[in-house]
Image: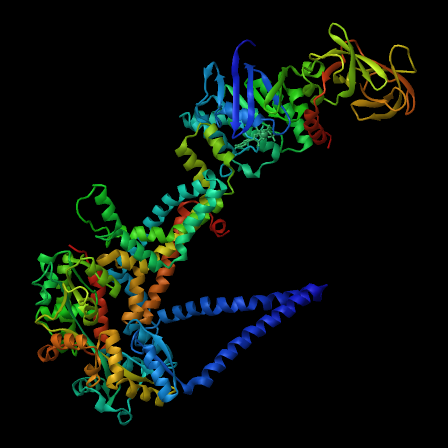
């Protein structure tokens, strides 16, 4: 019986080995290397904390990070505000057939690359684009108006590319919620808003948190949509990391920025979870 | 008892081509414990949801406290519903569940707190206010669902099979709790169930529902001894039911040939000579004597069982092929004649306690299914 | 017990499969190395027709990896010290920096190169400019310029000076890159000379700071900083911009169909780049690399690339083999005076790389108003 178990364990370990190797080579080792690089001076090869200090002393880097983070928080919030009614509609109102179609409609855009999505938005928003044309057709504006190359365009792009990652967790939590719970809230005198805020949102809290973390991280780590849609004022923290590696060949500074991005963003997520009063273990589950 | 809290008037509800509730009318007096009893799928929930406002009738009117509420949404009605699955708010504590409705009434914090404490005491959950509802037992959850509604002091409390999810013993206990609670708070209850023992033990009035229609509304005892339709006679209690053919009619009785025995029964509806009918006699009303007699129905004991409350005796009456199976129930405590399996006995019942209804083949199947469920 | 054994056997088979796969692919590569020429180059520099021709002449297969910009090229090479590639095509001004910092190139053996096929003027510029310790690391391959393109319908007067990038007359109808080429244009327009200043860190910093100040001032007139060719073409063809910085090759492809779009070289001179041919320090097929160099610089072969890309070649007499219209257009735009006035990109010392990256970031972060 005992040897039986041991064979089983060996079998299991050797089955999991390729996976462990994959995790090790592609996730752990690069991060360790990144960490090591971040503590070495550029062109000097000696230990230093300067790469980290640069972030805090140089206003350009700091502000770019703050700007990217604030934007990502706003994007996360907007995505949530749009996704929650969508998820509610999909799980609570739509019939099974419409449900499938709606889910497909949410997932479909993710079969095309983000680059193409961004180009599609450029066609929509540009001065001679679809939106400008339609608004003129409706008589709301009377000449071409530029909707591209501004902060709002960045938000539109980011919300669009990350929507799925909010909708899916929301749908999966809300679909476990029995309709009668919402009915009960109405029956006890609740209206739409207090049912939403006191019953539905607390219930979907795990989904909201999971979705928010994903959307926040994706937005903060975005590069394509931001640079293409944002135009001349679109400096993003990822672009600065890219610049360190590619423009300046300063791998050490780039590594430090990468690690800082990871730490600071995790910190923001952690604070977010604390504020919303959830347990981290709950969210991970 | 004259004031009417809920009035349902010619209400019909269709889902597509399917009529779930068919031209139903009834009145519920203030303070009554009113049950709607019927087999699964008979439209009970639909009816209740129309009263609470989750469905709107296709035709007919619903009055609550004298006002038409046909198109009033649930949150504007003075009714509250205890859901079939309870539907407690899983993210909230017991007290918060109960306070949810109170908060909508813009009461002060202290007032809410006082009311919550009070109702918790009422349902015997004192001290459990801070507990999360997921950490309660079935019976406790049940009482939270009740408290959540009762605290709002609704005109009518609607309950949709609230005991369905509980195990047998707890259900027996909760029946009494509910009945006592209702007596204490005096709120009008409309109680939906497919379990007749629940309906019969707790209610002042029972409406028996079948296929979207109400068959009979009576106090429990009358339902028992004076059924108005074949369905009710068949559905309520473990009734004796014998099939036969009408051979002659008197003023309000008929003679029916069952096998080779001739029996006299009150006519439950219009019956003519030659009709196929069923005769119903309550097992509880039949008296049994040892030995044969001229007047009574003679037979032999086939089964003799004591179940703790009743002696259940099965007697085979008549002779030959067409013997009649007669169920007899004698309450424990009454004097039992000295009989065994195989004893010769004679059976009799008071005049007028046998009732005849025309046979309805289709209903038969529905009831068979339902009764199977009950005995299982 | 049975199940456990099955699981074990399955696991072992799986692991063996993975290992043997990895080994097999490793073997394949080294066995083929000397029959293959591995290139790291730009899109269009090694068209399929020429690769075929090369194979039939030499029997060598060509494997090509493409790069998007010089930073990426260095990033790819730096990690392996050039291993994995034989022939590399960096831009002239990027050669020394990569060599000094990472040593990714091998010094060229000039006796293996048919230098008579190469334009002597360009040859001198590049071999001199890439000299480290007396050895040259690159020869010219092709060249092009960045100047202005204007829509003559809306801005017929524009394009005589880079100052038009800051001309309020064209406010919101201007686009250029937030990259070094634009900085040079602005610098020359301000009368500064970055090429001269670059050898001194302080002087270069000074030039770039002055230029940056001007560019931030002019930011309000820019519609956007264009990033990709596609973006620029969309902006021009939809007439959303009238004045833009532009590569000559893009202009050559646009003008024939859209004659209102004209490539103009302002009085400050076009900014010019030269792409080169270099041999990797980690080359396994050195002979093959020289064979390709001599093959590709033949005028008839160079002309194929010129037609395809729109660039000018460093091959002597290639214009004889390009289409007559193309030859005419090139001769019209690149008059001897214009060519003489080209401001070639210059090699950047590492401090200059940092200064440029710094001003680029600050330009993008600066508010428009
Ligand atoms: N929303 C609906 N759409 C279509 N049909 C429905 C709907 N709700 C109920 N029905 C149908 O109406 C009939 C009555 O349903 P209802 O839920 O009222 O029965 P019930 O008496 O409560 O049964 P149970 O004892 O099983 O709860 C059923 O046949 C059911 O399938
Ligand atoms: Mg029901």
Residue B367 sits in which quadrant?
A: top right
Residue A136 at what x, y percent from top left? 21, 44
The single residue placed furthest to the top in the displayed view is B251
Q: Quadrant of the C terminus of chain C?
A: bottom left
Please determine whether, in this image, residue A224 is positioned above or below residue C341.
above
Count the numbered circles shown. 0
Residue B261 at what x, y percent from top left? 85, 16
Q: Which image quarter has ligand 2?
A: top right
Q: Nearer the viewer, residue B267 or A262?
A: B267
Residue C30 at what x, y percent from top left? 45, 84
Q: Name the residue located 25 percent from the left edge and 82 percent from the top edge.
A: C302
Q: Nearer the viewer, residue C71 or A160?
A: A160
> Coloured how?
rainbow
The single residue placed furthest to the bottom in the displayed view is C111
Q: Nearer the viewer, residue A17 or C143?
A: C143
Q: Is residue A144 left or right of residue C164?
A: right
Q: Is residue C262 left or right of residue A184?
A: left
Residue B257 at what x, y percent from top left? 81, 16
Q: Nearer the viewer, residue C92 or B162?
A: C92
Residue B227 sits in which quadrant?
A: top right
Q: Is residue A14 left or right of residue C205?
A: right
Please determine whether, in this image, residue B25 is positioned above or below residue B145.
above
Is there any visible trace of residue C297 in the rendered image? Answer: yes
């Amino acid at each position: 019986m005992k040897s039986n178990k041991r064979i089983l364990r060996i079998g299991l370990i050797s089955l999991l080995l390729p996976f462990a190797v994959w995790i090790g080579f592609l996730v752990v080792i690069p991060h360790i290397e990144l960490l090591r690089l971040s503590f070495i001076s550029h062109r000097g090869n000696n230990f230093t904390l300067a790469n980290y200090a640069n972030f805090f002393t140089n206003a350009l880097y700091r502000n770019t990070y703050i700007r990217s983070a604030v934007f990502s928080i706003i994007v996360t919030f907007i995505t949530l505000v749009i996704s929650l009614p969508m998820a509610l509609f999909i799980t609570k109102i739509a019939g099974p057939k419409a449900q499938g179609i709606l889910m497909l409609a949410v997932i479909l855009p993710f079969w095309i690359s983000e680059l193409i999505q961004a180009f599609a938005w450029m066609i929509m928003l540009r001065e001679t684009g679809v939106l400008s044309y339609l608004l003129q057709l409706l008589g709301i504006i009377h000449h071409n108006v530029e909707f591209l190359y501004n902060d709002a365009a960045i938000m539109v792009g980011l919300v669009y590319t990350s929507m799925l990652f909010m909708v899916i967790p929301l749908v999966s939590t809300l679909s476990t919620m029995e309709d009668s719970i919402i009915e009960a809230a109405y029956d006890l005198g609740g209206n739409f808003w207090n049912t939403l805020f006191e019953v539905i949102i607390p219930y979907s809290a795990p989904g909201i948190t999971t979705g928010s973390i994903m959307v926040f991280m994706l937005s903060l780590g975005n590069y394509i949509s931001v640079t293409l849609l944002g135009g001349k004022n679109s400096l993003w923290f990822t672009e600065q990391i890219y610049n360190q590696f590619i423009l300046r060949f300063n791998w050490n500074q780039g590594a430090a920025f990468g690690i800082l991005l990871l730490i600071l963003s995790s910190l923001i997520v952690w604070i977010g979870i604390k504020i919303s009063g959830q347990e981290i273990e709950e969210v991970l589950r | 008892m004259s004031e009417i809290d809920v009035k349902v008037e010619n209400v019909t509800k269709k889902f597509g081509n399917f009529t779930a509730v068919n031209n139903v009318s009834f009145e519920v007096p203030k303070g009554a414990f009113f049950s709607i009893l019927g087999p699964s799928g008979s439209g009970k929930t639909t009816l209740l949801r129309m009263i609470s406002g989750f469905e709107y009738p296709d035709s007919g009117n619903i009055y609550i406290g004298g006002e038409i509420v046909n198109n009033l949404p649930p949150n504007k009605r003075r009714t509250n519903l205890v859901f079939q699955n309870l539907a407690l708010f899983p993210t909230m504590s017991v007290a918060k569940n109960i306070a949810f409705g109170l908060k909508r009434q813009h009461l002060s914090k202290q007032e809410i707190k006082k009311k919550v404490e009070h109702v918790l005491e009422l349902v015997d959950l004192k001290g459990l206010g801070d507990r999360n509802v997921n950490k309660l037992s079935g019976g406790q959850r049940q009482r939270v669902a009740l408290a959540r509604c009762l605290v709002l002091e609704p005109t009518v409390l609607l309950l949709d099979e609230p005991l369905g999810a509980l195990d047998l013993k707890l259900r027996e206990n909760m029946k009494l709790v509910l009945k006592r609670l209702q007596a204490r708070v005096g709120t009008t209850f409309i109680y939906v169930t497919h379990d007749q023992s629940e309906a019969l033990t707790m209610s002042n009035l029972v409406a028996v529902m079948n296929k979207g229609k109400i068959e009979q509304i009576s106090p429990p005892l009358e339902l028992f001894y004076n059924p108005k339709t074949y369905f009710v006679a068949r559905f309520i209690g473990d009734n004796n039911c014998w099939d036969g053919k009408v051979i002659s009619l008197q003023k309000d009785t008929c003679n029916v040939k069952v096998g080779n025995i001739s029996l006299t029964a009150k006519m439950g509806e219009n019956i003519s000579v030659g009709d196929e009918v069923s005769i119903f006699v309550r097992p509880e009303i039949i008296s049994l004597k040892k030995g044969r007699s001229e007047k009574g129905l003679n037979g032999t004991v086939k089964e003799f069982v004591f179940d703790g409350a009743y002696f259940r005796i099965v007697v085979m009456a008549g002779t030959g092929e067409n013997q009649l199976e007669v169920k007899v129930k004698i309450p424990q405590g009454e004097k039992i004649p000295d009989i065994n399996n195989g004893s010769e006995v004679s059976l009799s019942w008071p005049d007028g306690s046998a009732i005849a209804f025309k046979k309805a083949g289709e209903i038969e199947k529905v009831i068979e299914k339902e009764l199977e469920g009950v005995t299982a | 017990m049975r199940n456990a054994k099955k699981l074990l056997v399955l696991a072992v088979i799986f692991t063996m499969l993975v290992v043997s796969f990895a080994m097999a692919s490793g073997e394949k590569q080294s066995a083929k190395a000397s029959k293959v020429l591995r290139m790291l180059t730009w899109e269009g520099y090694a068209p399929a027709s020429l690769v075929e021709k090369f194979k039939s002449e030499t029997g060598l297969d060509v494997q090509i990896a493409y790069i998007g910009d010089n930073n990426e090229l260095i990033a790819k090479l730096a990690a392996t010290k050039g291993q994995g590639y034989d022939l590399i095509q960096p831009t002239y001004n990027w050669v020394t920096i990569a060599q000094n910092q990472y040593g990714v190139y091998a010094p060229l053996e000039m006796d293996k190169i048919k230098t008579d096929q190469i334009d002597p003027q360009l040859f001198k510029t590049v071999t001199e400019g890439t000299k480290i310790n007396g050895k040259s690391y690159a020869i010219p391959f092709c060249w092009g310029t960045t100047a202005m393109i204007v829509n003559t319908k809306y801005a017929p007067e524009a394009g005589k000076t880079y100052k038009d990038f800051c001309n309020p007359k064209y406010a919101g109808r201007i686009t250029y890159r937030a990259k070094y080429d634009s900085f040079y244009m602005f610098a020359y327009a301000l009368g500064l000379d970055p090429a001269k200043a670059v050898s001194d860190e302080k002087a270069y910093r000074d030039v770039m700071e002055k230029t940056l100040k001007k560019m931030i001032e002019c930011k309000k007139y820019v519609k956007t900083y264009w990033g990709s060719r596609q973006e620029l073409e969309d902006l021009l063809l939809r007439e959303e911009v009238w004045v833009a910085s532009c590569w000559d090759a893009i202009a050559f492809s646009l003008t024939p169909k859209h004659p209102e779009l004209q490539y103009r070289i302002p009085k400050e001179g076009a900014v010019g780049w030269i792409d080169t041919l270099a041999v990797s320090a980690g080359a396994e097929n050195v002979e093959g690399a020289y064979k390709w160099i001599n093959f590709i610089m033949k005028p008839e072969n160079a002309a194929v690339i010129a037609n395809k890309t729109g660039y000018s070649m460093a091959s002597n007499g290639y214009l004889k083999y390009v289409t007559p219209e193309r030859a005419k257009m090139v001769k019209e735009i690149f008059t001897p005076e214009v060519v003489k006035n080209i401001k070639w990109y210059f090699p950047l010392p590492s401090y200059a790389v940092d200064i440029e990256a710094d001003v680029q970031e600050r330009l993008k972060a600066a508010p428009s108003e």
